[in-house]
Image (cartoon, helix red, strand yellow):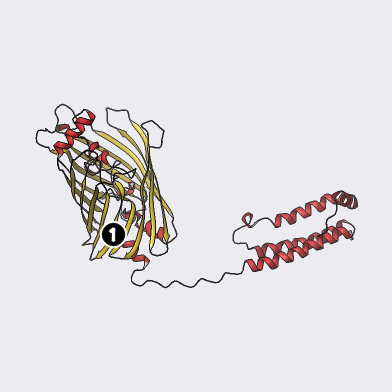
């Protein structure tokens, strides 16, 4: 393309030079990248428009200059038109549809939709549709958040953005998939201060082999109880999670490991993993083994634990589950074989506008006296750890809105009993303030099935005549997407 000096051109065109610059600028606007135009407009359409504008421009310039165009200007415009034709030919080759890849034959023995059933990734019932959509390619991300106000009459009333959670997943073809859960607790992380936590609670791969038999490995939620795998705020009533699931079965409990998951048919499904164990040196009288969770941070793998869970749905709306966990917990002590065993049973039933759920958990710690003695020697205090803990709750709820309403208001009542000093080792006496119970009354308002506003009041009681339990009320908001 031939170029000519701008000064000479301006002298030749005189007062018409600004008009020429404006017209060429308008052509430039027509050739901006596709991102500046509506996505439905193709490059071919844009080139058609530019050529049409160029033809009109030549006519306008001829009129403005008295019907004649200078040879330099005319040559410049003709070169621009030729260049546009070249771009059109190149664009037509680029926009030709690529040949379709050869279809991958479907594996009839194990189609992908069956994989969604046998290896449930997000266990909350409200999240089932979102999970299926994600692995179908329409939703690569999900998450949940919850904010709480807590008041117990003793401590200052607190407002806390309790959890901000993001879930990310990916499907590697039809046979391998990834799932993760990243959680920020209490909205702030500050080095060297007792503030929030950033935790990677799930990060694992599923290898889908057969509906009855699939392999899973990575950071896993321990499949014990209802809440540990179904802890989104829309999946349970009450602002805070049940006390049994905070103290006896500490939610959220996760660890590194691997194992098998599957759907056996007839309403039966199972999960069984080998995972890292809990650290007995961090057990306490008040919270049992909660602080002993290793949380996938340089976990001691000298002694691994085994966990298994079976769920059975014999009738529509009814789900029964049982879990068993066993593992050595004395690896921080020398020559101490302290095995912890956990048994749990739970049930959920939904009929029309009513729902009921319950859970029972029992733990047993071998050599509890030796664990207490070892902690006392190392820390200088007697932790008074029990050899047995017990907890259970029963809950009933009912929808209070008319059938067919676009939103819902649910009233609920839950009774809980949880005792971290249920059975003591020889020579140790129970601390009665840790034999506790709670009556929890509350409301859950759902303006949308995935958004909930919660209010509850907790009537607290313990067996101590000296250390009294404090009642409390809680207000919260939570959402899942």
101, above or below 236, in the image: below
Quarter location, residue 328: top left
The residue lying toward the viewer, choosing from 343 and 145, is: 343
Q: Is residue 478 visible?
A: yes
Residue 157 horizontal/vertical position (percent): 33, 30
Q: Secondary structure at mark 1?
A: strand
* Mark 1: few/some/many CA within 10 Å (<14, 14-19, 20+): many
Return the residue found at the far front.
Answer: 335
350, above or below 383, in the image: below
Residue 38 horizontal/vertical position (percent): 61, 58
Residue marked by disc 1: 261
Residue 75 horizontal/vertical position (percent): 84, 61
Quarter location, residue 2: bottom right
Q: Is residue 119 visible?
A: no
Residue 87 horizontal/vertical position (percent): 71, 64
The residue lying toward the viewer, choosing from 33 and 403, is: 33
Total marks drawn? 1
Which residue is found at the position 18% from the left and 28% from the top? 467
Q: For this view, does 141 lie left or right of residue 289? A: right
The residue lying toward the viewer, choosing from 41 and 330, is: 330
The N terminus lies in quadrant: bottom right
């Amino acid at each position: 393309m031939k170029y000519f000096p701008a000064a000479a051109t301006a002298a030749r065109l005189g007062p018409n030079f600004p008009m020429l610059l404006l017209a060429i600028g308008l052509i430039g606007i027509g050739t901006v990248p596709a991102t500046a135009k509506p996505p439905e407009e193709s490059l071919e359409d844009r080139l058609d428009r530019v050529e049409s504008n160029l033809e009109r421009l030549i006519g306008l310039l001829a009129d403005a200059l008295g019907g004649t165009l200078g040879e330099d200007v005319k040559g410049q415009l003709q070169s621009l038109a030729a260049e546009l034709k070249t771009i059109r030919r190149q664009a037509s080759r680029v926009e030709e549809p690529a040949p379709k890849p050869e279809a991958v034959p479907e594996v009839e023995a194990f189609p992908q939709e069956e994989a969604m059933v046998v290896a449930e990734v997000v266990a909350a019932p409200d999240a089932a549709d979102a999970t299926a959509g994600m692995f179908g390619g329409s939703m690569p991300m999900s998450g949940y958040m919850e904010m709480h106000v807590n008041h117990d009459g003793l401590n200052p009333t607190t407002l806390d953005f309790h959890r901000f959670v993001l879930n990310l997943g990916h499907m590697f073809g039809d046979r391998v998939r990834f799932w993760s859960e990243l959680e920020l607790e209490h909205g702030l992380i500050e080095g060297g201060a007792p503030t929030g936590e950033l935790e990677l609670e799930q990060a694992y791969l599923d290898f889908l082999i057969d509906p009855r038999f699939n392999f899973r490995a990575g950071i896993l939620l321990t499949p014990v109880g209802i809440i540990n795998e179904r802890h989104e705020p829309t999946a349970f009533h009450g602002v805070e999670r049940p006390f049994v699931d905070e103290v006896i079965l500490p939610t959220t409990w996760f660890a590194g490991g691997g194992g098998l998951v599957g759907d056996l048919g007839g309403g039966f499904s199972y999960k069984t993993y080998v995972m890292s164990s809990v650290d007995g040196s961090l057990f306490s009288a008040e919270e049992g083994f909660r602080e002993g969770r290793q949380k996938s941070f340089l976990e001691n793998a000298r002694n691994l634990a085994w966990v298994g869970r079976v769920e059975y749905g014999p009738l529509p709306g009814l789900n029964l589950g049982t879990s068993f966990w066993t593992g050595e917990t004395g690896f921080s002590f020398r020559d101490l074989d302290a095995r912890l065993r956990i048994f749990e049973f739970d049930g959920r039933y939904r009929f029309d506008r009513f729902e009921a759920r319950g859970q029972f958990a029992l733990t047993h710690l071998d050599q509890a006296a030796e664990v207490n003695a070892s902690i006392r020697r190392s820390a200088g205090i007697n932790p008074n750890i029990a050899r047995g803990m017990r907890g259970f709750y029963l809950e009933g709820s009912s929808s209070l809105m008319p059938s067919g309403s676009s939103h819902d208001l649910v009233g609920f009542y839950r009774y809980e009993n949880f005792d971290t000093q249920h059975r003591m080792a020889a020579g140790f006496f129970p601390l009665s303030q840790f034999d506790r119970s709670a009556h929890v009354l509350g409301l859950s308002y759902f303006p949308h099935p995935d958004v909930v506003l919660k209010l509850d009041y907790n009537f607290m009681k313990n067996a101590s005549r000296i250390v009294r339990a404090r009642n409390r009320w809680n207000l919260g908001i939570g959402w899942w997407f």
